[in-house]
Amino acid sequence: MGLLDKLANDTEQRAYMNYGLNDLINQSRSMYPMLKDIPMTYQQGSGYLESYPSGEVGSSEYPRPKEFPIDKFGIQIRNTNTTPEMVAADYVSHYMTDNDEYIKSNYEKFIDSLTPQQKELQKKRYNDYVQGYYTNEQGQQVELPKETRPFQDWKEQSDNDGIYRGLLFNQWSPSSYTDEQHELARQAKKYLGLL
């Protein structure tokens, strides 16, 4: 990256941090009242978002933001292309699936309903992540940091959440899901006020 490109990128990031982040947070809270009291901050990094459950201190590369009280869930935004839907999806899949009784029950039924074919696709996705990339629905390879967690940890901590929010927030193709899963998603959307 040349000096002018670096300066342009730095300027864009500063502008986003001062103005765009506040707009994103305000839009997110306006569109999704469940986010009203959730601390959010920005730090450029990999991916779009990182959630910090209460008590989690983070990693050496991405420590828990100082703006997040240790006893409160918070969301760190890492990419200027993040949307309010992504913020809400992260909150639902990383917080509400553990802390809201209705969503937790709905999520557990949803994950229990995964078909053998969907479970095979999870294994394929995991193998892609272990290689350091995944193949999106358009068949394009998207590079990622290599996955180092065992399959079961990755599945329970990341992929199950992605499958769930993928239908609730239209991040994955609706044809990837069964009728039962569509009905569970409809119930969750109604509960969340998304319908």
Image: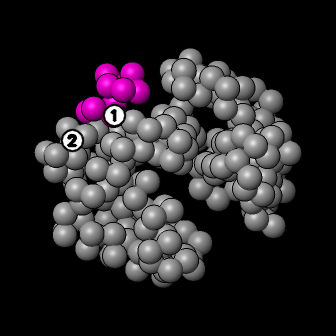
Q: Is residue 187 left or right of 46 when viewed as pictured?
A: left
The quadrant where residue 137 appears: bottom left
Residue 100 location, x and y as percent? 48, 37
Give the residue at x 55% y 69%. Answer: 144
Q: Which residue is mark 2?
A: 182
Q: Is residue 191 magenta?
A: yes
State which region is magenta.
186-195
Q: Which residue is mark 1?
A: 188
Q: Which mark is residue 179?
A: none
The quadrant where residue 170 appears: top left
The quadrant where residue 41 appears: top right
Q: Nearer the viewer, residue 156 or 83?
A: 156
Residue 72 location, x and y as percent? 72, 40
The amino acid type of the residue labelled 2 equals His
User: Of the residues tagged 1 and 2, which is closer to the observer?
Assistant: 1
The quadrant of the image that shows the C terminus is top left
Residue 97 location, x and y as percent? 46, 45
> Which residue sits furthest top?
30
Q: Nearer the viewer, residue 82 or 67?
A: 67
Secondary structure at badge 2 equals helix
Mark 1 surroundings: few (<14), some (14-19) or many (≥20) residues within 10 A: many
Q: Is residue 113 left or right of 42 when viewed as pictured?
A: left
Q: Is residue 181 left or right of 28 when viewed as pictured?
A: left
